[in-house]
């Protein structure tokens, strides 16, 4: 496969189930790109969750990644390219460009807001675990950023290796992200505000201390720890009971405003065109800076922060930039 060739969704999101244990597994399989899903892969992920929620051969779902990291978020390069082509909304919604559907005009409020509100729909692959009526377990290692951090906020249980980092680069290059309400509820307001305002990622131990992570183990013990939790969950009360338990927790989340938070985040993001950079401030990620490439812009901005607060693992190891 050439470096520019994008694999199909079926190769990026793998699925298998064991009817004997009733444990299913979704695996993010794009390690050369830090497991970033394409638009089609996110929609496949949502569809698999919907089917697994119905499937009587499944009681527990484990979500994990191939390689050293769970993942660093969605494929933004693909999204930006499709926006230029004018096909981003078609692909997100699963609408064939040849269908008789006229999309909102470019740069209209609806063009941006429609996409951002879509991320609050479980069919988008961004909020899909919220409607899952079985037990979900997220296995985290290395980076757990962006879209993958969404999954950590929405999963029932999070099992992590001790080298994991949690957060969202968008807090530094944009300032907000779709699952903010849910993260605030699961992390606690004070610690989440610290993450948002500093833009820094949190370690697995720090996430454990704010009750976001259920268990932290050395990397070599991660799969065994996940299996222990998955098997225990699979052997508890009947699946009908699990369904009832999940409905209870869903009602609790809606009382706390989980879905309302998605709508508020979408509204907040859709107003991004009104924001302006601070004049003469080096930390800004202006349009000119972003034109050089999102990855380069984020890495360059990362150097403005203390090493232990940087997003990149290599940057965090660099205690003295002059050394």
Image: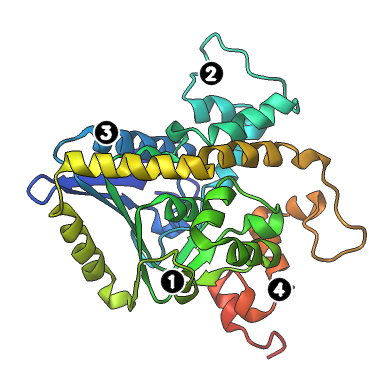
Give the Cα separation between the discs numbered 1 and 3.
31 Å
Residue 202 as seen in the image, left or right of residue 61: right
Q: Crowding near pointer 4: few (<14 within 10 Å), some, many (20+)?
A: some
Q: Are marks 1 and 4 in contact (CB under 8 Å)?
A: no
Image location (x, y in percent) of residue 200: 62, 69
Query: Which one is earlier in the sequence, the residue at label 3 or at label 4?
Result: 3
Mark 4 → mark 2, Cα distance in angstroms: 42 Å
Residue at which label 3 appears: 51
Q: Is residue 49 visible?
A: yes
User: What is the number of the mark on residue 303?
Assistant: 4
Which residue has dot 2 on it?
Answer: 97
- The C terminus lies in quadrant: bottom right
Q: Is residue 126 visible?
A: no
28 is higher (above) or lower (below) than 115 = below
Q: How many marks?
A: 4
Q: Which residue position is annotated with label 1?
A: 208
Of callouts 2 and 1, the N-terminal one = 2
Question: In whole angstroms, how far apart are the C-alphas of marks 2 and 1?
Answer: 45 Å
Dot 2: element: loop
Give the distance between the C-alpha atoms of the residues marked 1 and 4, in whole angstroms: 27 Å
How far apart marks 3 and 4 lie (CA) works out to: 44 Å
Marks 4 and 2, the one that precedes in the sequence? 2
What residue occupies the far bottom of the structure in this picture? 323
Image coloring type: rainbow
Residue occupying image coordinates x 37% and y 40%? 45
Crowd around label 3: few <14 · some 14–19 · many ≥20 (10 Å): few
Q: Position of residue 187 (x, y in %)?
A: 51, 62
Residue mark closest to the camera, 1 vs 4: 1
Q: Residue at x 34, y 33 (%)?
A: 47
Q: Residue furthest right?
A: 279
Front residue of this view, candidates 267 and 149: 267
């Amino acid at each position: 496969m050439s470096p520019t060739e994008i694999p199909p969704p079926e190769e990026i999101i793998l699925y298998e189930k064991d009817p004997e244990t009733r444990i299913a597994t979704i695996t993010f399989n794009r390690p050369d790109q830090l497991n970033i899903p394409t638009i089609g892969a996110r929609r496949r992920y949502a569809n698999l969750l919907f089917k697994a929620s119905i499937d009587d051969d499944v009681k527990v779902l484990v979500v994990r990644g191939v390689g050293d990291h769970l993942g660093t978020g969605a494929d933004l390069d693909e999204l930006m390219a499709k926006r230029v082509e004018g096909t981003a909304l078609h692909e997100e919604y699963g609408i064939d460009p040849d269908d008789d559907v006229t999309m909102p005009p470019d740069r209209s409020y609806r063009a941006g807001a429609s996409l951002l509100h879509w991320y609050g729909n479980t069919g988008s692959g961004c909020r899909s675990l919220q409607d899952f009526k079985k037990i979900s377990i997220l296995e985290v290692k290395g980076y757990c950023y962006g879209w993958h951090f969404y999954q950590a906020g929405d999963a029932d249980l999070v099992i992590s290796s001790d080298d994991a980092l949690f957060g969202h680069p968008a807090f530094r290059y944009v300032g907000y992200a779709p699952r903010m309400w849910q993260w605030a509820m699961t992390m606690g307001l004070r610690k989440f505000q610290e993450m948002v305002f500093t833009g820094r990622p949190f370690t697995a131990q720090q996430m454990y201390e704010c009750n976001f992570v259920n268990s932290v183990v050395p990397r070599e013990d991660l799969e065994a720890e996940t299996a222990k939790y998955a098997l225990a969950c699979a052997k508890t009360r009947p699946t009908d009971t699990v369904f009832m338990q999940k409905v209870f927790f869903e009602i609790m989340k809606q009382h706390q405003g989980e879905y309302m938070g998605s709508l508020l985040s979408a509204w907040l993001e859709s107003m991004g065109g009104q924001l302006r950079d601070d004049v003469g401030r080096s930390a800004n990620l202006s349009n000119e800076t972003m034109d050089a490439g999102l990855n380069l812009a984020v890495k360059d901005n990362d150097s403005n922060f203390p090493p232990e607060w940087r997003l990149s693992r290599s940057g965090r190891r660099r205690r003295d930039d002059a050394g």
